[in-house]
């Protein structure tokens, strides 16, 4: 059933990734404000820029979150409807002997309960699981990566710009590779089930 709605499902996952990336990047603006304040280079113009960036990021995050919630609801309703139609079609093809062996109330209760559970899984379950995975992987990458400007400045002073660039790029690549490893290992360990 998900196969029929693959583009919408993929769009939902992309929106989850964007929402997580924005939510993890907003604290960096605070870090830049504090760094500029400590270095005594925080001007009113820079502070205004940081505030504008923070408000823009928060606004984009809110809009993405809105659509991130609408897509699972749409998918769960569409898939639930398709499943109900298929189950109803199947039940209408059953012979009278089937209904003598199985009580109609039990069939209806089971059908209603099971389809509600499937809708919950498709609706928010899959996307919340993806969000948890994305938050963990992105946070891990940010935690490993985070070469702040002062660190790069020290590297340039100590090793020169070429070596500082090599070290910074190597650190970023290491963080991305480790994030990919975490992304693959977490489900294998049963941390996301």
Image: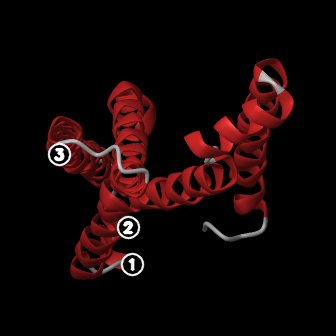
According to the image, label 1 marks what residue? Answer: 101
According to the image, label 3 marks what residue? Answer: 51
As drawn, the residue found furthest toward the top would be 162
| Labelled pair 2, 3 in contact (Cβ < 8 Å) | no
Q: Secondary structure at mark 3?
A: helix
Q: Nearer the viewer, residue 6 or 35?
A: 35
| Labelled pair 2, 1 in contact (Cβ < 8 Å) | yes
Which residue appears at 67% of the width and 71% of the height? 191
Q: Secondary structure at mark 1?
A: helix
As drawn, the residue found furthest toward the front would be 40
Q: Nearer the viewer, residue 19 or 4?
A: 19
Which residue appears at 38% of the width and 45% of the height? 16
Q: Is residue 176 left or right of residue 47?
A: right
Q: Nearer the viewer, residue 102 or 144?
A: 144
Which residue appears at 41% of the width and 29% of the height? 6
Q: Estimate the spatial distance between the alpha carbons at disc 2 and disc 1, rounded to whole Å.
A: 5 Å
* Residue 41 visible, this angle: yes
């Amino acid at each position: 059933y998900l196969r029929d709605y693959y583009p919408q499902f993929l769009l939902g996952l992309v929106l989850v990734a964007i929402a997580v990336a924005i939510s993890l990047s907003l604290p960096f603006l605070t870090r830049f404000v504090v760094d500029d304040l400590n270095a005594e280079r925080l001007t009113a113009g820079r502070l205004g820029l940081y505030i504008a960036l923070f408000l823009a990021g928060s606004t984009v995050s809110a809009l993405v979150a809105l659509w991130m919630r609408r897509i699972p609801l749409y998918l769960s309703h569409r898939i639930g409807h398709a499943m109900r139609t298929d189950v109803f079609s199947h039940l209408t093809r059953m012979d009278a002997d089937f209904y003598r062996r199985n009580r109609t109330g039990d069939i209806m209760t089971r059908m209603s309960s099971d389809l509600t559970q499937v809708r919950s899984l498709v609706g928010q379950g899959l996307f919340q699981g993806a969000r948890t995975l994305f938050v963990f992987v992105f946070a891990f990458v940010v935690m490993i990566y985070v070469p702040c400007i002062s660190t790069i400045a020290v590297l340039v002073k100590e090793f020169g710009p070429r070596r500082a660039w090599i070290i910074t790029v190597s650190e970023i690549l290491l963080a991305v590779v480790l994030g990919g490893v975490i992304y693959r290992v977490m489900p294998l360990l049963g941390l996301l089930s």
